[in-house]
Image (tube, helix red, strand yellow):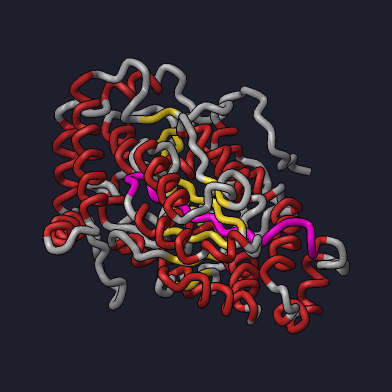
Amino acid sequence: MVNHSHQNNGKRDAWVVDVNMGYGHSRAAYALKDLSGGEVLSANAYKGIPAGDKNIWRQSREIYETISRLKPLPVIGNFLFEALDRWQEIPAFYPRRDLSRPNLQVRQLYHLIKKGWGRHLMERLAEDPKPLVTTFFVPAFMADYFGYPGDIWCVTTDADVSRTWAPLDPQGSRIRYFASNGRVVERLKLYGVHSEHIVLTGFPLPKELVGGAKATVAKNLLRDRLCALDPNGIFLQRYAKTLRVELGPSLCARQKASRPLTLTFAVGGAGAQRQLGAQIVRSLREKIVQQKIRVNLVAGIRRDAVQYLRAAVLEAGLKKQMGTWVSVPEFHSRADYFAGFNELLKTTDILWTKPSELSFYTGLGLAVVMAEPIGSQEEFNRLWLDYVGGGVPQNDPKHTDEWLFDWIESGGVARMAWNGYAEAPTHGTYRIEDTLLGRKSEIHPLPLIV
């Protein structure tokens, strides 16, 4: 029997490598940290990184974050972002065809790598050549090019990927992939990656929110969530037989008043869309005062975004409710943020965010309200989330107090939470661990959903 309990015994079975640009790649790496004894190495910010390497990473991050923050500005914001987005565009999937020719971005990345970018990191890791698991494609390219002696694995972090995720010469590459969904599996094949180099696992979700092969934690949290999301029992009555089989017979017998309905709004790593958080809290002001909903506004480690959202709460006249019925937590490190955010999700019923990597969190049984997508990959995440039934696009945020509660009263948001749990992958972290450690898995294989 495989022990899937959440523990960190300090043993390194692999190098887990991310890049700390935005949160998506780091969020996936954080879920996999047990593989590396609790340590995640950032390819763009590790101790001893050469100044030249660090400068290349810094410039690329600054360009992306600046354009992401400018996007809400009329004309110039859209122009700049569309130019960036075309650079990393995901081509139409149909008709299926050979898409293996490298794009401009891949060629530019390899130009820098051939000049030595990343050599220092790979030489350092090669001193202890454990399998390399990276949640960003560039470290995988570096490892492949510089002949890293261990296995090379790349974890995809969106519901579809651009040609940039595949190496310059896919047929000759050693890179293998942990694919976040079936569409990514098929897409990588179109890019020329060998099918035997692709393992369908699902996105790696935090163990503390899953609870092993039987998903005991996710099921317990979903019980509470469905009770909070279906105050009139419409969904619970309609699906009573199915819910009893999966979640047990005592659903809502005790939990009905266990905690308030809770909405968590999450800002992306670049701090974009903070204005949306202010709109949400203004609209929900009366509902918060009446203690009908609790709201978390999460801005990660961006102090400027935290201050903006706290000011918005005060401007909405919610000073008395600050810290109880509305909160804006501040985190001082990325690790603290991921741990704290996971803790908040234990009592979250609705997750409102742009369709980033957090789209996959519907697999935990979270109903997702989608803000406007930023970039091609988020457009595909939106389509995927709609496809599995775990989320819907936001309505007018100025009237959140009306449409959100209409959805809740009808049982529709409870249905989204259930759909997400039932249809989206939940055990990506465990599948990745089992594959990497060569152990027989208790986790059921995923269907090739595209």
Residue sitting at 49 percent across and 50 percent down?
A: 297
Q: Is residue 446 visible?
A: no
For residue 272: magenta? no
User: Could you say where residue 261 lies in the image, as x and y percent from the top left?
Assistant: 66, 62
Q: Is residue 51 left or right of residue 368?
A: left
User: Could you say where residue 270 lies in the image, as x and y percent from the top left?
Assistant: 32, 45
Q: Is residue 128 left or right of residue 428?
A: left
Quadrant of the drawing holding the C terminus: bottom left
Q: Nearer the viewer, residue 75 or 390?
A: 75
User: Could you say where residue 313 lies in the image, as x and y percent from the top left?
Assistant: 47, 51
Q: Quadrant of residue 308?
A: top left
Residue sitting at 42 percent across and 36 percent down?
A: 301
Q: Nearer the viewer, residue 269 or 216?
A: 269
Q: Is residue 208 above or below residue 121?
A: below
Residue sitting at 31 percent across and 71 percent down?
A: 93
> What count of labels does the image hold?
0
Q: Is residue 183 above or below residue 412?
A: above
Q: Is residue 352 visible?
A: yes
For residue 259: magenta? yes
Quadrant of the drawing holding the N terminus: top right
Residue sitting at 65 percent across and 60 percent down?
A: 291
Magenta extent: 256-271
